Image (tube, rainbow, N blue to C red):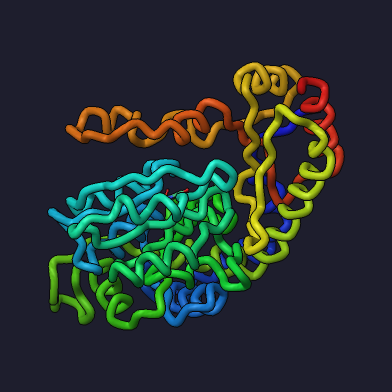
Amino acid sequence: MKVPFLDFQAPYLELKVELDAAYQRVMASGWYILGKEVEAFETEFAAYCQTKYCIGVGNGLEALHLILQAMGIGAGDEVIVPANTYIASWLAVSQVGATLVPVEPDEKTYNIDPSLIENAITDRTKAIMAVHLYGQPADMDAINEIATRHNLKVIEDAAQGHGARYKNHRVGSLGDAAGFSFYPTKNLGAVGDAGAVTTNNAELADKIRLLRNYGSRVKYENEIQGYNSRLDELQAAFLRVKLAKLDEWNARRGKVAEQYLKTLCENTNLTLPFVPDWAKPVWHLFVVRHPTRYDLEQHLQQNGISTLIHYPIPPHLSAAYKRAVCNFDSFPITELLSKQILSLPIGSHMNDRQIEAITKNLLEYI
Ligand SMILES: *Cc1c(COP(=O)(O)O)cnc(C)c1O
């Protein structure tokens, strides 16, 4: 039996009628950029995230970049970021010219370790970026407490966390602003690039609205030097259809995770994801650890099961950052994780036979 890592066909077929209708509605409207669909999606996604504002932008990286820009963070400022994250979290900080200060993850949650943040703060620190990696919320109370004490902004990279909850509050509502990605593989995915910012700060929301559209509120009146980073009508229309299904699809991912955790829990050399009491994750990825990760990966592949690694090269070891003259210390926990992690297939449309095939083959190996 073959188990692909991702399945785009089944989600499309489940919503085909609604998605096709959304396509026809936008095509017939003759209005393709910043119109009714984007406005409606922004209202609906803000409500979903329990925030006052949502601003649709071009992609997740741009969401983070525009947040930093709107906060006035730039050259000479320092931003604390997780050492263990997807490189986009770092690139956003580099794009505004600020200095990255990476902090190691907690070894159990893989998210930034709040107990190490305070040591990394200097008088140039302006913000802490928290990433809800793999759909597991970061420890936001601890992070916000430190930020308040040092007068720092808190930015959430929520690109993997749509719908996740921290102590009953939705991800995206837990800092000063959050960046979301709707890249097709994310829990809420468009059929191309798309992203959004959520925030409760009216001034920040207004600034980001300007920045995403050439610094312009009224056509041909440019208040500031902006960018072109807009969510388009077609993607917004598709996202509205899928947003209505997000909780149900996240719940189905949760069922797959539950089955993995139940079936695989007896084993010792396979480390399963850890979920703290305060977390309600959305299982963007189901990441296990194993000392001989590549052999395990091969064994599964030989049996038709595709896995991926998120991520094989930590940002500080990537050519992009090694070449830039950055004097990063080593990050032993991040480096060890990158050598041992393996992402098992997880999705809203997996069936029991697929899950059984995966767990059976895993148990055979470990
Ligand atoms: C996907 C992702 C991004 C970037 O999103 P894009 O839409 O691809 O630009 C940023 N951060 C994290 C953690 C991501 O997973």
Q: Residue at x 38, y 65 (%)?
A: 146
The image quadrant of residue 329 is top left
Compared with 213, 250 (above or below) is above
Q: Is 120 left or right of 14, judged from the image as shown? A: left
Compared with 74, 148 (above or below) is below
Where does the image place residue 322, in percent across and percent down from the top left?
26, 29
Of 275 and 67, the residue lying toward us:
275
Where does the image place residue 189, in percent across and percent down from the top left?
55, 55
The image quadrant of residue 35 is bottom left
The total of numbered circles placed on residues is 0
Q: Residue at x 21, y 35 (%)?
A: 326
Q: Quadrant of the C terminus?
A: top right
Q: Residue at x 42, y 68 (%)?
A: 144
Of 148 and 264, the residue lying toward us:
148
Kindly tell me whether residue 364 is visible in this rendering: yes
Of 150 and 18, the residue lying toward us:
150
Where does the image place residue 50, in percent across and percent down from the top left?
53, 78
Q: Is 3 left or right of 121, judged from the image as shown? A: right
Q: Quadrant of the N terminus?
A: top right
Kindly tell me whether residue 354 is visible in this rendering: no
Compared with 105, 248 (above or below) is below
Q: Is 11 left or right of 144, judged from the image as shown? A: right
Where does the image place residue 168, in percent across and percent down from the top left?
62, 72
Q: Residue at x 66, y 44 (%)?
A: 273
